[in-house]
Image (cartoon, rainbow, N blue to C red):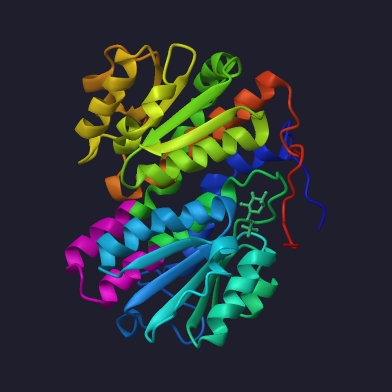
Amino acid sequence: AQVDKAGHRHFMAKEIAEQPSRLTTALNHYLAEDGTFRLPGQGLDFRAMDRLTMVACGTASYACLVAKYWFEQIAGLPVDVDVASEFRYREPPIPPRTAALFVSQSGETADTLAALRYCRDKAATILSVVNVAESSIARESDLALPILAGPEIGVASTKAFSCQLVVLALLALEAGRQRGHMDEATHAERLAALRSIPGLVNHALGLSEASDRVAAKLAEARDILFLGRGRMYPLALEGALKLKEISYIHAEAYASGELKHGPIALVDKSVPVIVMAPHDELFDKTVSNMQEVMARGGQVLLVTDREGANVAAHGVWEMLVLPDVAALWAPILYAVPAQLLAYHTAIAKGTDVDQPRNLAKSVTVE
Ligand code: G6P
């Protein structure tokens, strides 16, 4: 069927706005009425795995990086994450009891598909998280999990990323339950928190105006830094990717703790620094990294929650304040301001939001 912009100026705006309903669809697809997890086919035995290897490209690879934190914390399952173009030629050993998980919106990315075939030849269990259910990657998997985001037209991935995260979050919870890595009460609490994400994402969409205001300034920058720590580090990477893809501004992301090992040399008053930091267990550490930036004249945009805003507002240039969210699932919610900042900065620069130069939606050649 023909997909239209449904009254939005761009497909990207429509796809950002659709997220609450798409996330709800994805959650409902995998959860039965009683909250039990419903996997298609034969199911999946996480106790039979010693290691999970995750492979993807672009935005999907950042979803994998977030999921690494989840699988390791929630399920005690060691995870490797690789970009497919590196993985496929490195001849990585695939020991027994390894499962390989491929994440792809299109399901047709050439490098990801080649990496999948490599793992299949090594007899790994092949799992995939895809948007296009009839794609090559889905067909060649032992178990393909659809994210149900609906067609994504904007080249810069938005709703596919958040839906990938939700499906990976459900998988990590299921892995944790099967492997006995958390008690029933903790499982129930985390699941309830995950179920509240679509509503919170809906609130976060209200930051569009504030993002637009901030974007007017971001659009003047030549370089922008994104900082995050722990689960928010992959979000910083995604924020920087989104921004460079559609606004053509040079943006880089660093794990906040790495700042002092190099990138702080770049900081001066002309460099906006976007800090993605919910008030979680690492917040104080991130704030001290942020203060090092401000001491060198860096203009900090702090993306945080109410508590974070209460304690760390001093000296920052701007803040975007999100609703409170369970720390574990914060990356899903914080994807929204990352998308909105990129979108409004691109509008301010007058670039082609849906069809950025030099980029393809699906890269089916090497
Ligand atoms: C292209 C797109 C990116 C996407 C990447 C992986 O480069 O422009 O937005 O993240 O491919 O695509 P996939 O379909 O495998 O998720």
Looking at the rendering, the quadrant in which ligand 1 lies is: bottom right
Q: Residue furthest right?
A: 2
Instruction: Tell me, yes or no, if residue 323 can be seen here.
Output: no
- Tell me what residue is drawn at x 55 percent, y 36 percent: 339
Numbered range of the magenta stretch:
170-193
Tell me what residue is drawn at x 70 percent, y 44 percent.
Answer: 154
Q: Is residue 48 above or below residue 362?
A: below
Residue visible at 28% across and 45% down? 327
Asked if residue 283 can be seen in this view, the reply is yes
Q: Nearer the viewer, residue 287 or 80?
A: 80
Is 8 in front, or is 293? Answer: 293
Residue 296: where, in percent of width, then height? 34, 14
> Residue 206 at x, y = what percent?
49, 28
Query: Is 232 within the magenta?
Result: no
Total marks in image: 0
Q: Quadrant of residue 366?
A: bottom right
Name which quarter of the figure residue 346 lies in: top right
Against 188, is 261 above or below? Answer: above
User: Residue 125: horizontal and vertical position, in percent?
Assistant: 48, 83
Main SS of residues in magenta: helix
Q: Quadrant of the N terminus?
A: bottom right
x then y, percent, for residue 45:
36, 83
Please indicate whether residue 89 sits to the left or right of residue 362 in the image.
Answer: left
Name above or below for residue 157 compared with residue 312.
Answer: below
Q: Is residue 175 magenta?
A: yes
- Residue 360 relative to residue 166: left or right: right
Query: Along the line of sight, which residue is nearer the eye, 89 or 277?
Result: 89
